[in-house]
Image (cartoon, rainbow, N blue to C red):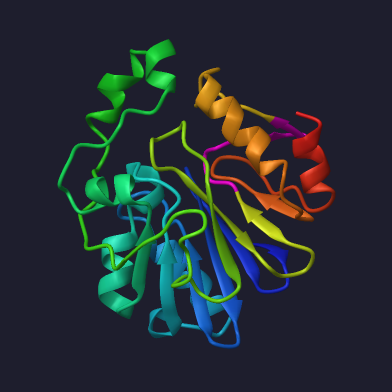
Amino acid sequence: METVTDGVYLISRGSNAYIVDGDDGVVLVDTGLPKRHGLIIEGLSDIGRSTKDVRAILITHAHFDHFGGAAALRSASDAAVYASHVDAMVIRGDKPAEPPPVLERLPFITSLMTIMPQAASLAVDHIVAEGFDQELPEDFTAIDTPGHTEGHLSYLLNRRGGILFVGDAANNANGSIKRGWFNRSTDTIEGSIHHLASFEFETAVFGHSGPLRSGASAAFCRY
C-alpha cells in the first residue's frame, strides 16, 4: 500500500484502487481485479480500519479490473455503491461490458481477457452524474468523463487542494498527462481530458499509473 497524501492510500495489483479515510468512515474508489479484494482488506487493517468502516464504494467505470472486488467488499461492509447510469447496467449484470478501446488496436488481447476471472455483478445503490451527485459522500464531486466507457466517471475530492480520481480517462506519464495506451484518439476521449483541465486540483491519481502529487490540474491544461 502506498500513501498518496494524508488519508488517501493506493492499492496496486494490476489495477489501482484507493482507500479514502475520513472522520465519517472510509470511501473506496474502485476495487481492483476480481479475487484481489483481500489487498484492500489488508490495507484497511494497516490504517486501523476494517470493512465495517467502509460506507461507500465509488466506481469509475464498469470494467472488471475496476469493480472486480466490489461485490465481496459490499457484502462484507454493507457500503453503498455509486456509479453512472450506463455503467451501472453492466455492474448489475443487465448488459455486457463495453470492450476497452485498446482492443480496437490490439485485438489479440481479446483472447487473453476471456481467461481472466470476471467481476461478480452487484446492486448499484446510487446513480450519479456531473451535477447530479448530491448523494455522494460529502467531500466528493462526480465529473462526467465518457470515452473509455460511455458512462465513465472521475471523482474530485475536496481535500488538500483537490484530489482527482481520474480512473481510465487519462494516464500519468512521468508528470505529463497522456491519453493512455488503453484509449484511442477520439473526440469523446480527448474532450473528457480537456474537460478535466477545467477543474482545480493539486493531486491526480489514475487507474493504471502512479500519482501526480502536485500541479496536477496544470498538467492537464498542458495536454
Count of numbered badges drawn on the protein: 0
Residue drawn at (29%, 68%) of the image: 125
Q: Is residue 99 visible?
A: yes
Furthest residue in direction left, as rendered: 94
- Does the magenta portion include 169? yes
Q: Is residue 9 left or right of residue 32?
A: right
x and y percentages locating residue 58 in the rendered image: 44, 62
Q: Quadrant of the N terminus?
A: bottom right
Estimate the x, y position of residue 131 in percent, counting from the top left: 51, 58
Q: In front: 105, or 193? A: 193
User: Which quadrant of the figure contains the C terminus?
Assistant: top right
Describe residue 160's horizontal placement relative to residue 61 as left or right: right
Residue 90 drawn at (x, y percent): 24, 45
Q: Relative to 69, is 152 on the left or the right? A: right
Q: Nearer the viewer, residue 194 or 181?
A: 194
In the image, residue 119 sits, relative to residue 11, either above or below, namely: above
Residues drawn in magenta:
166-177
Q: Quadrant of residue 218?
A: top right
The answer to whether one can see residue 180 in this image is no
Q: Residue at x 20, y 37 (%)?
A: 96
Query: Relative to 116, does residue 7 appear above or below in the rendering?
Result: below
Q: Residue at x 43, y 11 (%)?
A: 105
Indicate yes or no whether the magenta region holds residue 179: no
Q: Residue at x 45, y 50 (%)?
A: 60
